Amino acid sequence: MLQPNIKKITNFIFELNQLKRQKNTGFKLCGVKDPYSTADHIWRAAQIGYILAELEKADAEKVVSIILIHDNGETRVSDQHKVAARYYSKKEAEEKSFNDQLDGLGETIAKKWKKYSREFELRNTPEGIIAKDADWLEQAFQAKEYMEIGYPMVENWIANVEKALETASAKRIIKQMKKTGFTDWWQGLKKMTYKKLYR
């Protein structure tokens, strides 16, 4: 049985910080000057995943766990857009990177994370399907925000995600998202604090 190695675990935790520094390359193709990071994407996708899992009556904690690790391999191979994927297997490179990262984390973690990674890639469980829907849906939400601030080319993300979604809940959410402005959430929440001195 492979035992956890505290030095390797420590290095892995430092390595995860690369996901905060790494910018989404696909949105750069559309001219977005400072796109969000992979860590930003994971954070919101995990919360979307939890919500979708509850709506779909699946294991929400498992879905979140799948999403939290789904881009770990990118710390070593970086985020690659779909044009780059035309020339080499991004999936193969990420999988090799991910598997190398598991060395030293211990057999229990390695076994579970490999299982989660397969579920995400193969979408062969309800949680794997929901995790992938959450991953895609988060990117559609980000695309909508970029589109509304002046990057029209990202509309393609929304159309592609809409075609790919599998769960009924994700399909309902993207339909609503398309009709909703990204700043609608705070409308009516502002509290005006000024006082008139003279009438």
Image (cartoon, grey):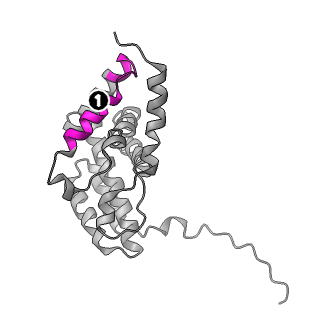
Three-letter amino acid code of the residue under disc 1: Asn
Q: Magenta region's main secondary structure?
A: helix
Toward the viewer: 60 or 100? Answer: 100
Q: Quick check: 89 above or below 158?
A: above
Looking at the image, can residue 123 be seen? no
Write down the residue under mark 1: 99
Q: Residue furthest left?
A: 87
* Quadrant (top left/top right/bottom left/bottom right) for the C terminus: bottom right
What residue do we see at 30% from left, 56% from top? 172
What residue do we see at 44% from left, 24% from top? 8
Toward the viewer: 135 or 26? Answer: 26
What residue do we see at 38% from left, 76% from top? 150
Q: Is residue 115 left or right of residue 141?
A: left
Q: Residue furthest right?
A: 197
Q: Which residues are magenta?
A: 91-110
> x and y percent of residue 148 in the render?
39, 73
Q: Residues within 10 Å of mark 1 (few under 14, many from 20)?
A: some
Q: Residue furthest bottom?
A: 199
Can you tell which quarter of the image residue 94 is in? Answer: top left
Can you tell which quarter of the image residue 138 is in? Answer: bottom left
> x and y percent of residue 127 in the render?
30, 36
* Quadrant (top left/top right/bottom left/bottom right) for the N terminus: top left
Q: Quick check: 190 above or below 161?
A: below
Can you tell which quarter of the image residue 33 is in? Answer: bottom left
